[in-house]
């Protein structure tokens, strides 16, 4: 509840993107746990390869609280969050196509991916933005690490930073669908509470066409963020 209050003054896209990423993290954490429980070290390594974006210790701050912090201090336009979402998806898809172990958006990597994607989006979209030192403080990392993550991220997306109006609209549609999902969840939870129903199980799919995804799917499909 406190985290929801932090997002009151933030653009609505911040809360929607937070919700989507939280489900992605929940799903990939669950997949990694099941692989580890099944004693499949090769698969586990493929799911979580060495990366500058992976923390050695799981950050204590939640995705929603971290997004609220970025929204509060970064001062970027709402469109930047949509573009950051596009960049994240490009990074993951491109990484999968290059044949390397796909980077999982999990509780160890999501924070660094977020701050770096927003930084890249702000620099490309907004006329005025803060420098890397400021974003490093906002993200809770050092300036050298912020600089390194930015370079690694740019190479990861192949310096493909342009987002066409059509692409922007497509990703807005995915976020809009997520927003409708959240509204339905709220309505269902309110109704369930009124009739004293049991707890509702939430899906951790990325998008509408992920409903049939199982834990045995390939690591590349597990990481993609777009519909």
Image (cartoon, rainbow, N blue to C red):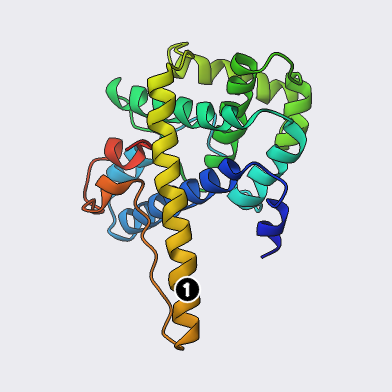
Q: Residue 143 location, x and y as percent? A: 74, 23
Q: Position of residue 180 (x, y in %)?
A: 43, 53
Image vertical order of residue 92 relative to residue 223, above or below: above
Q: In this view, does 38 lie above or below 157?
A: below
**Considering the numbered disc 1 on the image, is that residue within a helix, a strand or a loop?**
helix
Q: Tell me the residue that label 1 is attached to.
A: 189
Residue 78 image-quadrant placement: top right
Residue 4, percent from left and from top: 65, 58
Location of residue 75 (image quadrant):
top right
Look at the image and tell me in which quarter the C terminus lies: top left
- Quadrant for residue 129, please give it: top right
Sort mark 1 into few (<14), some (14-19) or many (20+) by Cα contacts within 10 Å. some
At 42% from the left edge and 16% from the top edge, which residue is drawn? 164
Taking 17 as reference, is 34 left or right? left
- Answer left or right for 155 relative to 77: left
For the N terminus, give its image quadrant.
bottom right
Q: Nearer the viewer, residue 100 or 96?
A: 96
Q: Can residue 99 be seen in this view?
A: no
State left or right for residue 9 relative to residue 51. right
Res. 137 visible in picture: yes
Residue 145 percent across, percent down from the top left: 67, 25
Residue at left 39%, top 47%?
177
At horizontal 21% and vertical 53% (from top left) the residue drawn is 212
User: Camera-side residue: 79 or 35?
Assistant: 79
Tag count: 1
Q: Residue shown at 44%/88% (left/top)?
A: 195
């Amino acid at each position: 509840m406190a985290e929801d209050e932090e997002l009151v003054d933030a653009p609505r896209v911040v809360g929607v993107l937070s919700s989507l990423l939280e489900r992605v993290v929940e799903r990939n954490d669950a997949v990694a746990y099941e692989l580890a429980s099944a004693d499949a070290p090769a698969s586990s390594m493929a799911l979580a390869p060495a990366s500058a974006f992976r923390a050695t210790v799981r950050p204590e701050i939640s995705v929603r609280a971290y997004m609220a912090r970025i929204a509060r201090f970064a001062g970027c336009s709402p469109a930047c969050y949509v573009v950051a979402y596009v960049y994240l998806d490009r990074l993951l898809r491109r990484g999968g196509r290059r044949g390397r172990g796909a980077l999982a958006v999990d509780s160890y990597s999501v924070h660094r991916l977020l701050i770096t994607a927003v930084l890249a989006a702000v620099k490309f979209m907004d006329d005025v933005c803060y420098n890397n030192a400021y974003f490093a403080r906002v993200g809770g990392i050092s300036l050298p690490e912020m600089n390194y993550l930015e370079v690694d991220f740019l190479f990861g997306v192949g310096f493909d930073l342009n987002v066409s109006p059509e692409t922007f609209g497509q990703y807005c549609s995915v976020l809009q669908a997520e927003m409708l999902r959240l509204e339905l969840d709220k309505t269902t939870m309110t109704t369930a509470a009124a009739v004293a129903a049991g707890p509702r199980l939430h899906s951790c799919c990325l998008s509408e066409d992920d409903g049939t995804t199982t834990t045995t799917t390939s690591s590349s499909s597990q990481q993609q963020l777009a519909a």
